[in-house]
Image: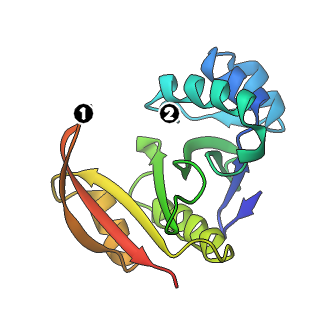
């Protein structure tokens, strides 16, 4: 588990992902220690099902995918974050995060991203952390800039269309 001043980032096990993907809020809450669930803690439930199935076949990659974000004071699941798999050849590691709308604008995404970056720095194989955002000025862009990421270019994503790439050397 990763900890920040205000958050716990709980590694997503197959059991947690199964409860989340199947919409079993009671089981998800129970597995997270009885936390409440924010209304829009996840915008990508289909990704949770995919990760569950992937981790069943690749248990050695546990910890290199999704984390459930629990707000310490509110004892509430407020989002997900993580990596898009283990470091790629050449040491590139991609991060992502999502926070319930009621919790946005409080610096929590910055805390989450900083914790992911710190964990990445602890692994000698990671040289660069990357992220992608919509191709517009938005809160995620502000988070990445605040953490020292630089713009690496515009690319086309099959699902999202035009997106912006960001990178942060960690070695």
Q: Which mark is residue 42?
A: 2
Q: Which residue corresponds to the image point at 55% horizontal and 52% vertical from the top-left?
A: 83
| Residue 118 sits above or below residue 62 on the image | below
Of 7 and 62, the residue lying toward us: 62
**Residue at 61 percent of width and 20 percent of height:** 21
Q: Are the residues flagged by discs 1 and 2 in contact, CB closer than 8 Å?
A: no
Where 134 falls versus 145 (above or below)? Answer: above
| Residue at 84%, 38% in the rendered image | 33
| Residue displayed at 33% across by 58% down | 140
Q: Position of residue 67 (x, y in %)?
A: 64, 47
Camera-nearest residue between 149 and 7: 149
Determine crowd level at label 1: few under 14, some 14-19, many 20+ residues with C-alpha closer than 10 A. Answer: few
* SS label for mark 1: loop
| Quarter containing the N terminus | bottom right
Per the model, the C-alpha gap separating discs 1 and 2 is 21 Å
Q: Which residue is mark 1?
A: 158
**Neighbourhood count class around disc 2 (C-alpha, 10 Å): few under 14, some 14–19, many 20 upward:** many
Q: Quadrant of residue 146?
A: bottom left
Q: Tell whether 133 sits left or right of 94.
A: left
Could you tell me residue 37's position as x and y percent? 63, 32
């Amino acid at each position: 588990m990763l900890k920040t001043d205000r958050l716990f980032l709980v590694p997503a096990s197959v059991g947690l992902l199964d409860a989340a993907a199947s919409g079993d809020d009671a089981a998800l809450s129970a597995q997270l220690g009885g936390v409440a669930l924010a209304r829009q803690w996840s915008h990508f439930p289909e990704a949770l099902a995919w990760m569950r199935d992937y981790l069943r076949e690749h248990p050695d990659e546990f910890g290199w995918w999704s984390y459930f974000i629990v707000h310490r004071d509110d004892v509430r699941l407020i989002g997900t974050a993580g990596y898009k798999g283990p470091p790629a050849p050449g040491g590139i590691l991609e991060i992502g995060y999502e926070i319930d709308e009621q919790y946005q604008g409080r610096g929590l995404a910055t805390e989450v991203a900083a914790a992911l970056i710190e964990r990445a720095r602890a692994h000698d194989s990671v040289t660069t952390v990357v992220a992608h955002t919509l191709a517009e000025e938005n809160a995620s862009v502000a988070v990445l800039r605040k953490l020292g990421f630089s713009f690496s270019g515009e690319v086309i994503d099959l699902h999202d269309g035009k997106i912006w790439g960001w990178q942060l050397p960690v070695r």
